[in-house]
Image (cartoon, rainbow, N blue to C red):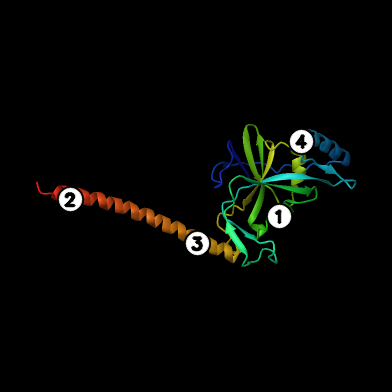
Amino acid sequence: MDCLTTHDTLDSSYSSGQDVQKEREPHVYLSKEEVKEKIQSYNSSVTDKLKMTLNANGIYTGFIKVQMELCRPITVQSSQSQGRYTPSNRETAFYLPDGCVNTLHISSTNTVREVIEALLKKFFVADNPAKFALYKRCHKEDQVYTCKLSDREHPLYLRLVAGPKTEMLSFVLREHETGEAMWEAFSIPELQNFLRILDKEENDQLQILKNRYAAYRGKLEEALRGVLKPG
């Protein structure tokens, strides 16, 4: 589990914070009675009506909220498009607004990988799920720890143990921090959109430089006219 710590919320560049040597928290297996007691305690503290339900088979269901902290644009396909994670003429790439939070109804058996896939499917995101990772953010000793969860962990269990307060535990979806972009994981529309964004940024920067040098040239010409002006 990769962990970062910071006194403030990490920004979208992920550059703030320091690496923390922190052991993986052990998964404590709860008996059916312990789960029942924790769910009762959890539900008594819920303020947004997003309660958990214990089924007769011991599996429980509930809600988690996931904050989307994505640096790169996502590719969204129309609901009529066929196939998953494949290029389509009905795909659109755009940046997700900062602070976007999504709520999912899941069960205690759902893994992190399944939660990521469900998030993408819910909003018709065509991107490959392998490009994303789910993180947990928790407060301990006046610090905020952001830890990458393994694909096999169960988010609803973590939510139950931590309680309903998001100040104690929250979930964040981000791109994998691989150092370099996994270009082979992107679809053709995404790559084409990246090129359009780069072209626009390049043209904007060129225009800024042209305007700057045009202003300098104007000032120099004005100064020359003042010097060469007949006395």
Q: Is residue 87 left or right of residue 33?
A: left
Give the residue at mark 1.
122
Identify which amino acid the numbered label 4 is placed on: Val
Badge 4 element? loop
- Residue lying farthest right? 56
Q: Between marks 1 and 3, how big is the CA–CA gap?
A: 27 Å
Identify which amino acid the numbered label 1 is placed on: Lys
Identify which amino acid the numbered label 2 is placed on: Arg
Q: Is residue 45 left or right of residue 14?
A: right
x and y percentages locating residue 68 in the rendered image: 63, 48
- Residue lying farthest top? 141
Specify which label sits upstream in the sequence, 1 or 3: 1
Q: Between marks 2 and 3, how big is the CA–CA gap?
A: 43 Å
Specify which label sits upstream in the sequence, 1 or 2: 1
Q: Between marks 1 and 4, how big is the CA–CA gap?
A: 25 Å
Identify which amino acid the numbered label 3 is placed on: Arg
Give the residue at mark 3.
196
x and y percentages locating residue 142 in the rendered image: 62, 32
x and y percentages locating residue 5 in the rendered image: 60, 39
Query: Is any part of residue 129 visible from this angle?
Result: yes
Q: Which is closer to the viewer, label 2 or label 3? A: 2
Determine which of the numbered discs, if any, sits on residue 225 in the image.
2
Give the residue at mark 4.
46
Observer-nearest of 81 and 185: 81
Specify which label sits upstream in the sequence, 2 or 3: 3
Specify which label sits upstream in the sequence, 4 or 2: 4
Badge 2 element? helix
Q: Quadrant of residue 89?
A: bottom right
Q: Quadrant of residue 22?
A: top right
x and y percentages locating residue 180 in the rendered image: 55, 57
**Mark 1: few/some/many CA within 10 Å (<14, 14-19, 20+):** few
